Amino acid sequence: MNEKQTKTLLYIGGALVAYKVLQPLLRGLGILETEPIKPLTPADNEVIKKAGGTSLLTAQEAKSIADGQLAALDGWGTDETALFSPLMALTGPDLAQVFVRFGAKWYDKYFGTSSWAWVPGAQQLNLFGWYSQELSGRDLQRMKSIWQKSKLKF
């Protein structure tokens, strides 16, 4: 590989890293679009029903909380306040809808960040998988306690 090719690869790599680091900030500022809200599937509705009935959250509210969970978990360090506060007053069905709206996101087990599928070590995890990777000790126990209301298997 010659010097020009090396520089090109370094620029591309640097741009990808910068984008990945700035992605949560850009989403928070509304500059970067978040995923569209998909309609619930019959299986999703069954998960919510098993949690105790009907969620009082709108699709947008549940998606916003799910996106906030990802933002609090993503990147270096975890924002515990942003992680726990939005969940405290939710009912079991509300929590189940947040879980369903989170879906499965790519996780880089080496850097503890959201990832792309092609990154070595990347795996798709649901919300509980992200919690299990990012939280430990009292924080993980506290999160499990909150989610007991949803009757979902953590």
Image (cartoon, helix red, strand yellow):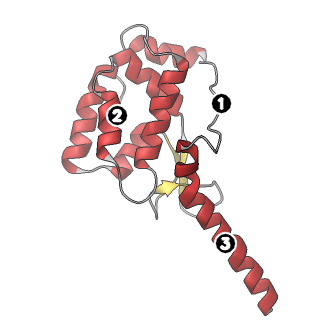
> Residues under labels 1 and 2: Cα distance?
26 Å
Neighbor class of circle 3 (other Cα within 10 Å; few <14, some 14-19, many 20+) is few
Which mark identifies residue 13? 3
Front-most of 151 and 57?
A: 57
Neighbor class of circle 2 (other Cα within 10 Å; few <14, some 14-19, many 20+) is some
Query: What x and y, as percent, mark residue 34?
Result: 62, 38
Rendered position, 105 above or below 149: below
Residue for point 45% across, 38% down: 68
The amino acid type, in three-letter code, at marker 1 is: Pro
The amino acid type, in three-letter code, at marker 2 is: Phe
The amino acid type, in three-letter code, at marker 3 is: Gly
Of labels 1 and 2, the one closer to you: 1
Rendered position, 19 above or below 3: above
Q: Earlier in the sequence, mark 1 or mark 2?
A: 1
> Residues under labels 3 and 1: Cα distance?
28 Å
Residue at numbered disc 1: 36
Which mark identifies residue 154? 2
- Determine whether label 1 and label 2 are within 8 Å by CB: no
Q: Secondary structure at mark 2?
A: loop
Total marks in image: 3
Query: What x and y, as percent, mark residue 38?
Result: 64, 24
Q: For the C terminus, which image quadrant?
A: top left
